[in-house]
């Protein structure tokens, strides 16, 4: 790790990270404020129960039951929105790690210094990881704080068990996003590839949960190992799922280092 | 000045079908100021990037300060000050921030960086996004020079600088050379190279056309000759050995002459001459004459 580069990366990225965390906290505030009213709306509940099953699966929940806070949060936040928002943070960070600096020419300035390429990547990667952890924990703490403020019975064990699963999911997403950043020459292509792969995984998982014949397809998507409602309800960390996601992230990151060590730096 | 700090042997780099450099055999000696000349697209920047380990060679080797430029690039970078083309900088960082950041990689250089900034008249408290092109070039120069390395590799170091600052840069480079550092800089500005360099290497279309000491280049004795005849004009002037670029307008003849002047004088003496003037060709003319204009050359 190169601490000089870590300090600079933190200096460059902390504002953006704080904005994402703040936006999510505001969204949690809105949802926790809404929940008590939603709980009382039996009419809405009956309407949502009539929606097709595929719709609940698309939002990453078994059923659209808004009387349960866990189900409500899984549906309104953790199933899709949280993935989109934190995913955007990861894509934005990863695209600049290599491809963005290559485009701006500053990669040449950086690699003219006595720093190994793998150290450069791990230093920036460490800051990205810290950002992911920070945003996830800030969101969980927001749920606790605002839940208490609105008198909601929040499952602390459930949300604490959810945190490592979310972190592992975004480590996997970060892994292949960084890989695209080292392999591709344009930041725009990095974002397109990262978004495309993530969306592809999401749709594959949706297809796998919708059709029995496509069930096995689910094993090949990262979202098979991300089931927020199950974790919230059980209150225990699915260690196997976390390890698979972390393994995907680590393997992609190792591949990034391999490619970056051999990459021609020519803007 | 016998120790070689840069040695390339058959160094080759292609970009797909395009030749970056091919079978480049370049040597730079310790303590010299070496000008690396060539038109745009000739391979100057590719050579510098290969020496800095930014590009992986397709063939051959590059040795810098006794180290392999690709495999030992980190060790090479610790000893080399590098100025990339187009002065890449972080737009949201101040000048001082850049100096502290680069000094952080080398554990020294901050004081020297601040001293150079004062000498070049650069204000460091502004963000780079507010810098002019010249200011960016000054800062990029400072970042390359501040650790006082034994070797400086610079891609067009005076690009975008006004003449007064250019002069300061030449003084600084001379001071570094007097302290024992070696300097290689690329340029397509021949007068600049003529002013400060000991030797010049010329690259065209990825190939090294030749290397010469500046003194030897001047001594190639290329002359510009203008003759005004009173009467007839000799028809066979162009057949004299060494005569090139012959132009005739009435009784006025202009030509370039390589080598000995005596045969021309003896021929011209047989005719009635109104005026005869000779001047030594500029280094630029010498360069073009001996190394050709080539494809994509800009004549400098």
Image (cartoon, rainbow, N blue to C red):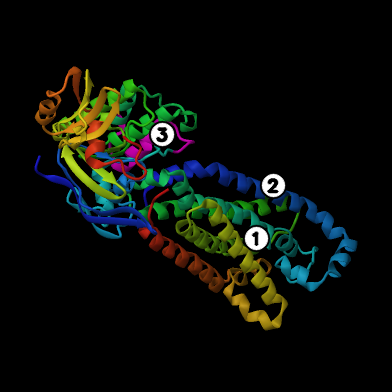
Mark 2 nearby-residue class (10 Å; few <14, some 14–19, many ≥20):
some
Name which of mark 2 and mark 1 comes first in the sequence. 2
Where residue B260 appears, as percent x and y from the top left, is 11, 32
Mark 3 residue element: helix
Which residue range is magenta in the image?
A: B90-111
Which circle marks residue A26 in the picture? 2
Quarter of the view holding residue B278: top left
> What's the residue at 64%, 61% (across, down)?
A159
Q: Is residue A19 above or below residue A255?
A: above
Q: Which chain letter matches label 3?
A: B
Q: Position of residue A160 (x, y in %)?
A: 60, 61
The crowding category of the residue bearing disc 3, from other C-alpha atoms within 10 Å (few below 14, some 14 to 19, many at least 20), is some
Tell me the CA gap for discs 1 and 3: 44 Å
Total labels: the figure holds: 3
Q: Are marks 2 and 1 in contact (CB under 8 Å)?
A: no
Find disc 1 in the rendering and name its residue.
A156
Residue A163 visible, this orientation: yes
Cα gap from disc 2 to disc 3, whole angstroms = 34 Å
Residue B286: name its quadrant: top left
Q: Position of B30 compared to A190: left or right?
A: left
Residue that sits furthest to the front in the current view: B232
- Check the residue under mark 1 and report the chain it is in: A
- Residue identifier under label 3: B97
Horizontal arrangement in the rendering, residue B120 relative to residue B215 (left or right): right
Residue extending furthest bottom?
Answer: A213
CA neighbours of label 1 inside 10 A, class few (<14), some (14 to 19), many (20+): some
Tell me which residue sits at (57%, 74%) in the image: A220
Q: Is residue A207 left or right of residue A118?
A: right
Q: Is residue B152 magenta?
A: no
């Amino acid at each position: 790790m190169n601490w000089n580069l870590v300090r600079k990366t933190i200096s460059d990225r902390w504002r953006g990270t704080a904005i994402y965390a703040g936006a999510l906290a505001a969204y949690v505030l809105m949802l926790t404020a809404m929940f008590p009213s939603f709980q009382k709306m039996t009419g809405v509940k009956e309407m949502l129960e009539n929606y097709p099953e595929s719709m609940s699966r698309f939002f990453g929940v078994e059923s659209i039951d808004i009387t349960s806070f866990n189900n409500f949060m899984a549906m309104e936040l953790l199933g899709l929105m949280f993935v989109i928002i934190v995913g955007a943070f990861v894509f934005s960070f990863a695209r600049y790690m290599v491809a963005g600096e290559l485009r701006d020419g500053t990669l040449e300035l950086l690699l003219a210094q006595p720093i190994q390429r793998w150290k450069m990547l791990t230093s920036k990667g460490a800051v990205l990881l810290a950002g992911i952890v920070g945003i996830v924990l800030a969101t969980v703490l927001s749920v606790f704080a605002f839940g208490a403020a609105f008198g909601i019975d929040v499952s602390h064990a459930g949300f604490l068990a959810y945190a490592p699963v979310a972190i592992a999911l975004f480590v996997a997403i970060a892994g292949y996003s960084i890989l695209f950043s080292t392999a591709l020459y344009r930041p725009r292509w990095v974002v397109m590839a990262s978004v495309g792969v993530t969306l592809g995984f999401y749709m594959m998982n949706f297809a796998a949960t919708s059709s029995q014949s496509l069930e096995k397809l689910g094993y090949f998507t990262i979202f098979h190992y991300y089931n927020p409602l199950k974790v919230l309800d059980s209150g225990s960390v699915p260690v196997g799922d976390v390890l698979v996601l972390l393994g995907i992230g680590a393997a992609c990151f190792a591949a990034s280092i391999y490619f970056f060590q051999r990459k021609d730096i020519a803007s | 000045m016998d120790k070689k700090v840069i040695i390339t042997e058959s160094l080759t780099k292609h970009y797909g079908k395009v030749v970056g450099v091919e079978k480049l055999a370049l040597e730079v000696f310790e303590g010299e100021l070496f000008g690396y000349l060539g038109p745009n697209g000739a391979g100057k920047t590719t050579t510098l990037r290969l020496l800095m380990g930014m590009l992986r060679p397709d063939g051959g080797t590059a040795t810098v300060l006794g180290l392999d430029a690709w495999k030992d690039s980190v060790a090479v970078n610790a000893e080399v000050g590098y100025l990339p083309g187009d002065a890449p900088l972080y737009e949201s960082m101040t000048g001082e921030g850049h100096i502290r950041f680069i000094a952080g990689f080398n554990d020294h250089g901050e004081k020297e960086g601040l001293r150079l900034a004062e000498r070049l008249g650069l204000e460091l408290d502004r963000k780079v996004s507010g810098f002019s092109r010249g200011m960016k070039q000054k800062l990029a120069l400072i970042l390359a020079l501040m650790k006082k390395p034994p070797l400086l590799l610079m891609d067009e170091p005076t690009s975008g600088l006004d003449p007064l600052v250019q002069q300061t840069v030449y003084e600084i480079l001379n001071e570094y050379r007097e302290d024992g550092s070696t300097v290689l800089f690329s340029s397509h500005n021949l007068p600049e190279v003529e002013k400060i360099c000991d030797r010049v290497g010329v690259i065209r279309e990825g190939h090294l056309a030749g290397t010469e000491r500046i003194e030897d280049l001047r001594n190639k004795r290329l002359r510009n000759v203008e003759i005004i005849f009173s009467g007839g004009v000799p028809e066979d002037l162009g057949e004299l050995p060494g005569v090139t670029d012959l132009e005739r307008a009435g009784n006025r003849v202009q030509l370039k002459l390589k080598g000995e002047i005596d045969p021309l004088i003896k021929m011209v003496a047989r005719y009635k001459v109104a005026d005869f003037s000779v001047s030594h060709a500029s280094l630029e003319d010498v360069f073009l004459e001996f190394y050709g204009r080539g494809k994509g050359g800009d004549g400098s």
